[in-house]
Amino acid sequence: MKEINTIGIIGFGVMGAAIGMNAAASGYYVVFKEVDEVLVRSNYEKWVLSALKKKVDQNKMNQADMDKIAGRIRGTSRYEDLSGCDLVIEAAVEDFGLKKKIFGDLSRVCRKDAIIVSNTSTFPIEQLMADVLHPERTAGLHYFFPANVNPLVEVIRQEKTSPETLEAIRAFAERNGKTVIEVRDFPGFAINPVFISSYMVLNSFYGNYNAATLESISKEALGLKFGILWVQNFSGIGTSYHAAKSMYDYLISTDVGFVKMPESLEDCFKTAGRWNLEDGPVIEDKTIRKVVSDRLLGTIFTIATHLVEKAVVSVKDLEKGVRISLAWPQGPFLLMNRLGMEKVRELVVNTCYSGLFKMPQRFSVKTPEPWVL
Ligand SMILES: NC(=O)c1ccc[n+]([C@@H]2O[C@H](COP(=O)([O-])OP(=O)(O)OC[C@H]3O[C@@H](n4cnc5c(N)ncnc54)[C@H](O)[C@@H]3O)[C@@H](O)[C@H]2O)c1
């Protein structure tokens, strides 16, 4: 197996820094590249020194361990300093043109056997890596926010990814203490299509019902401690909005289809910047709540079935991945089995007739057997 000792990280922001800290704490050497020397210094100070010092002050780490971890990380503003890396993880801002250029530059400076991966949230890996020489060493390595805490990582194989590359990045992620699911290159990969369509459909009811009610329905329907609108606020409405737009653009003209961009999400992004989860009384009327909750579940069941039919991910991995990354007590398939396939089919058919998705084959003719988990 390809040995990985030193990793490079492009972009030491929220995700890149958390990935780097996680790797350094697991014994890897980390070289991060930022836009200029000012950002190299300020990001090292903020994400490495201040974060570790806080742990020492709280007696969660001793000074020797802090020095060891901090000593394994160094920053640069020059691509040439990544020439010794065995693996480079790109975590720059979500801009297709920028990322594509970064991969072209990496291809020029990295060793030809260095593995090159992206932490993009939505862009297809194959398109991003189009300019990389030896594309068999490219793949996706998708972490979840917050990346040093969330245990799930999606390992994404594109058409040209070699088995050796997959094996090496899986081993790397596992040595970082992560749980890995394997996913085929697809817009948003496996977890985001489920999560993004869930919030889009809930947001589409905003205006008819307030945010407090939609938040409460999501918690009840899925058994959550923190509802879906809360998670949207936590990870940022800007990220929610851009990811939703990107998913819709990629999938609307395919045989999967996708939920339309809710006007309320666009408004929230352009004005308030977050959902006000205390915007009035929570509606307790069971009939109203059932309309919203049926549509939410119908959406989750439909997209999960499409992902499995398209061989993007296995039933077991999607079930496990949703539970781990989103902290849902049950994933889509256990939810379906527990609800009963007759009822599930009714929800899927109604969701597809409403134009939110195209009909997955499994539900198109008759009620299928429960999922084998
Ligand atoms: N934030 C999340 O919840 C989340 C979750 C999963 C994946 N992602 C993905 O991770 C990536 C990074 O997101 P983020 O939230 O950390 O963004 P961020 O804005 O916090 O960090 C991006 C960093 O990239 C740097 N950068 C920009 N251009 C660069 C270049 N040419 N060379 C080197 N550095 C450059 C910026 O200075 C910045 O520090 C995006 O692709 C995003 O979609 C984000």
Image (cartoon, grey):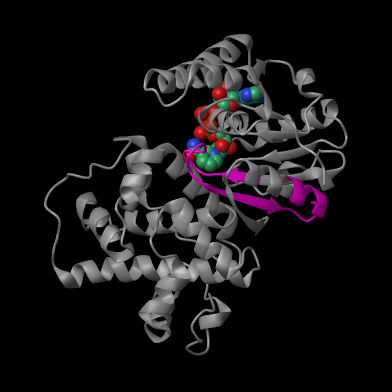
Where 333 falls versus 50 (above or below)?
below
- State the residue in front, 368 or 287: 368
Q: Which residues are magenta?
A: 141-168
**Image quarter of residue 266:** top left
Residue at 47% x, 49% y: name it: 244
| Residue 280 x %, y % | 13, 48
**Image quarter of residue 135:** top right
- Which residue is outermost to the bottom? 366
Where 174 falls versus 309 (above or below)?
above
- State the residue in front, 130 or 371: 371
Residue at 58% x, 44% y: name it: 177
Can residue 351 be seen here? The reply is: no
Can residue 164 be seen here? The reply is: yes
- Which residue is outermost to the left? 281
Residue 155 magenta-drawn?
yes
Left or right: where 173 falls relative to 104: left
| Residue 169 x %, y % | 71, 45
Number of numbered discs on residues: 0
- State the residue in front, 297 or 257: 297
Left or right: where 113 falls relative to 96: right
- State the residue in front, 306 or 10: 10
Residue at 43% x, 53% y: name it: 326
| Residue 12 x %, y % | 58, 25
**Image quarter of residue 183:** bottom right
Quadrant position of ligand 1: top right
Left or right: where 351 falls relative to 127: left
| Residue 74 x %, y % | 65, 17
Where 190 falls versus 24 (above or below)?
below
Residue 302 magenta-drawn?
no
